[in-house]
Amino acid sequence: MSGSISATQAGTTTGARANNAGANNAGTGIGADFNTFLTLLTTQLQNQDPTNAMDANQMTQQLVQFATVEQQIKVNTNLERLLSVEQGNQLVSAAPLMGRVVEVESDRLALQGGQAQLRLPAAGEARRAQVTVQDANGRTLRSAEVTLGSTPMNWSWDGRDGNGAQLADGAYRFTLTGSRADGTAAPVTAGVLARATAVDRRDGEVRLSLGALSVAFDKLRGLAAN
């Protein structure tokens, strides 16, 4: 699925499923507890000993519990509706990103058309960064040491392993290790640059696809110059 139209249609369909799922969850979670509580309370009232009726204070406490559970169900339902609306807004917001190069937070590189990029920060506490690209089995495919500059910079990977073999497009795990001028370890982070190809709603959240790489929409960090 790609393009803004397909992404929006998918979001609408999935949104309906999410609403149904929310209703089902209410029925099997707190809603089920509410129904059970109501049944127990009714049964208790029907079968109590007329000569030893329920104490008024106890009755009041149970009614308060009854009202509290009912209110919580309504709050949960409203929150689910608000979440569905917010996710719909995210789908609409993501549609113009299709085909654009974006920066996201991830521990995987998106190899697209034999190219992948990281957005490295400017030199600070860390002066150098060691980038290591790995396959799904943890085997090192490419390793490079990069000297950080005075401004943020891009690091590119041509999709080739250490033997020069071209690898298939996909999502490849990477690690990033920073070091100070004296060689001691220093924290460093990087953004992943890739072209957005699709957006949809899965497992209760909006996700952005960058080729084979899929990230939650809230991992979006910005747009890159195309």
Image: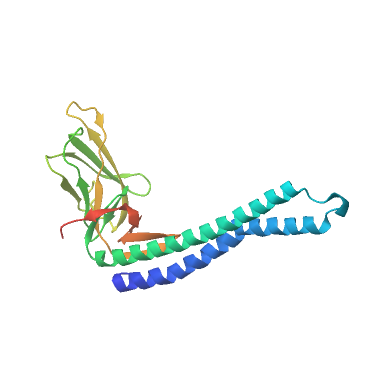
Could you tell me which quadrant the C terminus lies in? bottom left
Q: Can see residue 137?
A: yes
Residue farthest to the top, as pictured: 182
Location of residue 151 in the rendering, given as x and y in whole percent from the top left corner: 13, 43
**Residue toward you, 133 or 100:** 100
**Residue toward you, 164 or 90:** 90
Q: Quadrant of residue 132?
A: top left
Location of residue 140 in the rendering, given as x and y in whole percent from the top left corner: 30, 43
Identify which residue is drawn at 83% across, 54% down: 48
Q: Quick check: 31 above or below 155?
A: below
Location of residue 180 in the rendering, given as x and y in whole percent from the top left corner: 20, 30
Identify which residue is drawn at 26% across, 30% down: 185
Could you tell me which quadrant the N terminus lies in? bottom left
Residue farthest to the front, as pictured: 56
Location of residue 212 in the rendering, given as x and y in whole percent from the top left corner: 33, 59
Q: Quick check: 160 above or below 1?
A: above
**Residue toward you, 158 or 97:** 97
Identify which residue is drawn at 72% across, 59% down: 39
Q: Indicate left or right for 28 with 155 as reference.
A: right
